Image (cartoon, rainbow, N blue to C red):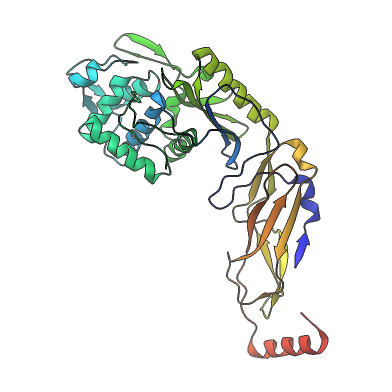
Amino acid sequence: MTMVCQRLAAVITAAVWFAATLPVAQAGTIDTSARQAYLIDLTTHTVLLDKNGDQRMPTSSMSKIMTMYMVFDALKGGRLSLDDTLPVSERAWRMQGSKMFVEINNRIKVEDLIRGVVIQSGNDAAIVFAEALGGTEENFAHLMTKKAKEIGLLNSNFMNATGWPHPDHYSTCHDLAILAERLMYDFPEYYHYDSERDFTYHGIKQGNRNPLLYRNMGVDGLKTGHTETAGYGLTASAIRDGRRLVLVANGMPSMQARADESARLIEWGFREFGVYELFQPGETVEQAQVWLGDAPTVPLVVEGGLKLTMTPGERKDMKVVLKLDEPVAAPIAKGARLGTLVISGPGFVTREVPAVAAADVGKQNLLSRAMTVAGHLLFGWI
């Protein structure tokens, strides 16, 4: 039967992580000058803004996030250490664009090279890593693409380690947001490099190119990018009160526009939306009646709890309905899906969340089952 959970009606939102799809907040909207933009609340995996988020685009130096994912993976796997030194080839030394200013035929410590890529956006440092880990930059790019597919970047292809323009080198804002999350949570021990504001190497001090690090708005990463074709881009992550947003924006007309527009979109995400806890882990949603079980009811829970992202205005008209066919026949295994929470309201797509058994329920013994069936036939007992 269908049961309306009355006590939940005041705290429901338009967004919830369910299955493999990302909920999209529909109530709020904002225009942006970026050609492509994707803003996601990682606390609930709710998309707050999606403008051409799956459109292929040149990613310029934002590609170096993938390069660093490969480096951090090698560090975690023991194939590199921070104190290792790597050789500088003539190709790396001659590389143009943003540079760390590595010295030809020198050996440079891995930790310095990390800062050279992350802080200084050094194309030369990225090639040093590529040649060390892949033998050649071309082979390293092939490994980048393979790893990208493994971690969920389904619309990305890498032809080099730097983001240097190439017609077959591309990604999407959506993919870069996935990559940013994976880098932060797969390698938290190395993410601190992204928030460092400057690095001096070879007597040359360079500031971090991420303009939002200097605005005191909770931003702690990740990477800028720019080419003539791509325009100005930024992948940024910001955290406030335990809530983390990731923004990927590309195709902006200038450095100043990149800084101002990215800041505006992140501030909008924090200001217009909040995260609300609907159920804590293990908290009972409802008791379901059990047929022929050694317990009369079984508690239903949402595995892992449930947090939802919404605007304050969306709270008023939201509705939660528990769809459940009762009684549920025993035996019941803990974790079995028994019902569905349907979250609905004006202005957004209805979401469905599994309600699962919080405990095992066995069958009644033979005598008890016979008495229960007889009682049901004679008196309508459940």
Foreground of the two, 372 or 144:
144
**Which quadrant holds residue 78?**
top left
Name the residue located 26 percent from the left edge and 38 percent from the top edge: 79
Q: Decide: is 380 above or below 194.
A: below
Q: Nearer the viewer, residue 377 or 361?
A: 377
Q: How many marks?
A: 0
- Please identify the residue farthest to the right as the structure is shown: 379
Residue at left 79%, top 82%? 381
Residue 216 visible in image: no
103 left or right of 236?
Answer: left
Residue under the point 78% across and 49% down: 9
160 in relation to 295, above or below: above
Residue 219, percent across and down? 54, 25
Residue 340 visible within the image: yes
Q: Quadrant of the N terminus?
A: bottom right
- Taking 237 as reference, is 93 left or right? left
Q: Position of residue 228 (x, y in %)?
A: 41, 17
- Residue positioned 70% across, 51% down in the render: 343
Q: Quadrant of residue 334?
A: bottom right
Quarter that holds the C terminus:
bottom right
| Percent x, y of residue 271 | 68, 28
Q: Is residue 241 left or right of residue 156?
A: right
Residue 379, placed above or below residue 33: below
- Residue 253 at what x, y percent from top left? 51, 16
- Residue farthest to the top? 203
